[in-house]
Amino acid sequence: MEQPPVRPDGLQIEENRAFQESFWRAERIAWFFFGLALITATLGITGSGGFLARQVATFDNGSVEVPRFSRWEASDTLNATLAGGGEERSLTLSPEFFRTFQVEDIDPPPISAEGSGDGLLYRFRSGSSQPLELTLHLRSQAPGIVSYRASVNGEPPQAVRTIVWP
């Protein structure tokens, strides 16, 4: 077996230095992208929780918190707070919402749900003067960008957008 020649630095190894340097360069680029993926996941852009994962539409008589980022066929929630009082309260979601999301459960259940020109109107009743906290358990049915409108107690609807990742 033939031995490699001794290099000027005193080592007697055979290596392709140009290949090694290009490999190190590729590793550094990969580290950058792995770090970027970690930061986006931590912020909530992947749809699994985090600072940017949710958005809130605020109304005079309540608020609606919807996912900003969601995952296809994964469970998610829409939370709404309706102003307190003994009268009937409502939550309206536009038809575009139901083209992408399936409502699996509503807690507490509505007293009625009826279709209107603005979408589906859920009616709730509570004898308490405390605000009514609603949770709609959702499952997205298709990936993409979904723009829809939400309204509380007949107020003018606000546009919200959810990105559903595949």
Image (tube, grey):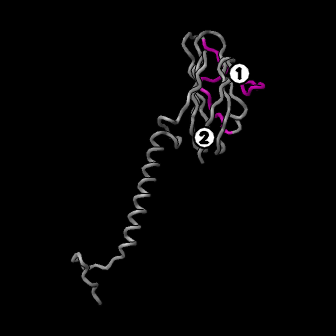
Q: Indicate the position of residue 44 as horizontal and vertical percent values.
A: 49, 39
The verdict on residue 49 being magenta is no
Most common SS among magenta residues: strand
Which is nearer the eye, 110 or 22?
Answer: 22
User: What residue is disc 2 on?
Assistant: 163
Residue lying at 68% horizontally and 39% vertically, measured from the top left:
100
Task: Check the image and report above or below for 44 versus 29.
Answer: above
Q: Residues within 10 Å of mark 1 (few under 14, many from 20)?
A: few
Q: Indicate the position of residue 127 as horizontal and vertical percent values.
A: 60, 10
Which is nearer the eye, 159 or 91?
Answer: 159
Q: What element carries label 2?
A: strand
8 on left or right of 162? left
The verdict on residue 112 being magenta is yes
Q: Indicate the position of residue 108 as horizontal and vertical percent values.
A: 60, 23
Indicate the quadrant where residue 163 lies: top right
51 on left or right of 134? left
Q: Indicate the position of residue 148 as horizontal and vertical percent values.
A: 68, 32
Residue lying at 57% horizontally and 40% vertically, measured from the top left:
70
Disc sitting over residue 32 in the figure: none
Q: What residue type is labelled 1?
A: Ser
What stretch of residues is rendered in magenta?
A: 100-126
- In the picture, the quarter occupied by the N terminus is bottom left
Disc sitting over residue 112 in the figure: 1
21 on left or right of 166? left
Which one is closest to the eye, mark 2 or mark 1?
2
84 on left or right of 31? right
Q: Is mark 1 on a helix, strand or loop?
A: strand
Q: Which amino acid does label 2 sit on?
A: Ile
Q: What is the spatial separation of the Cα atoms under label 2 and label 1, in whole angstroms?
A: 29 Å
Residue lying at 71% horizontally and 38% vertically, measured from the top left:
99
